[in-house]
Image (tube, helix red, strand yellow):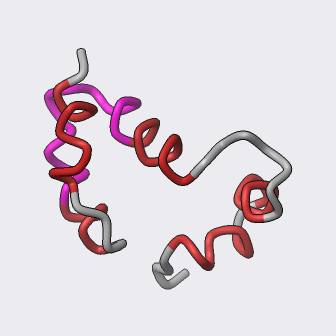
Amino acid sequence: MPQQGWEGWGKRHPAGALTANGKTPVTRELAIKGYITSSAKVTRYRLVEPLRAEGINPDDYREDFDYE
C-alpha cells in the first residue's frame, strides 16, 4: 500500500476513521507523541525520516525523543 499523509489514514485504518470523525479524544499530537515514546529510546532515531516524510518536524518533539 503506498504511503499517504495523515489525511488518508482514516480511510485505511478503523481507528483513524474514528479519530477523523472526532469520536475519540486521540489527537494528531497525541498520536505522534505516542508513536515516538512507544519506541525504545535507543532506536527512536529511526523515526526521524518517517516523520519528516509526513511533513512533521522531529525537532518539535525533541522532548518526546528524550523521554525515558
In the figure, 10 relative to 67: above or below? Answer: below
- Image spot of residue 23 (x, y percent): 85, 50
Quadrant assignment for the C terminus: top left
Please give the name of the residue rendered at 27% of the width and 26% of the height, measured from the top-left corner.
Answer: 40
Q: Is residue 45 magenta?
A: yes
Please give the name of the residue rendered at 19% of the width and 55% of the height, measured from the top-left corner.
Answer: 48
In the figure, 56 relative to 37: above or below? Answer: below
- Image spot of residue 67 (x, y percent): 24, 22
Numbered label tally: 0
Quadrant assignment for the N terminus: bottom right
Is residue 17 rendered to the left or right of residue 27? right
In the figure, 21 relative to 53: above or below? Answer: above
Magenta range is 36-48
In the figure, 68 relative to 66: above or below? Answer: above
Most prominent secondary structure in the magenta stretch? helix
Is residue 55 rendered to the left or right of residue 17? left
Quadrant of residue 24 in the image? top right
Q: Is residue 14 magenta?
A: no
Is residue 20 rendered to the left or right of residue 30? right
Quadrant of residue 55 in the image? bottom left
Please give the name of the residue rendered at 50% of the width and 80% of the height, measured from the top-left corner.
Answer: 4
Please give the name of the residue rendered at 14% of the width and 28% of the height, measured from the top-left corner.
Answer: 42
Instruction: Point out the residue furthest to the top here.
Output: 68
- Image spot of residue 45 (x, y percent): 14, 45
Residue 55 vs residue 11, the one in the foreground: 55
Instruction: Point out the residue furthest to the bottom here.
Output: 2
Quadrant of residue 9 in the image? bottom right
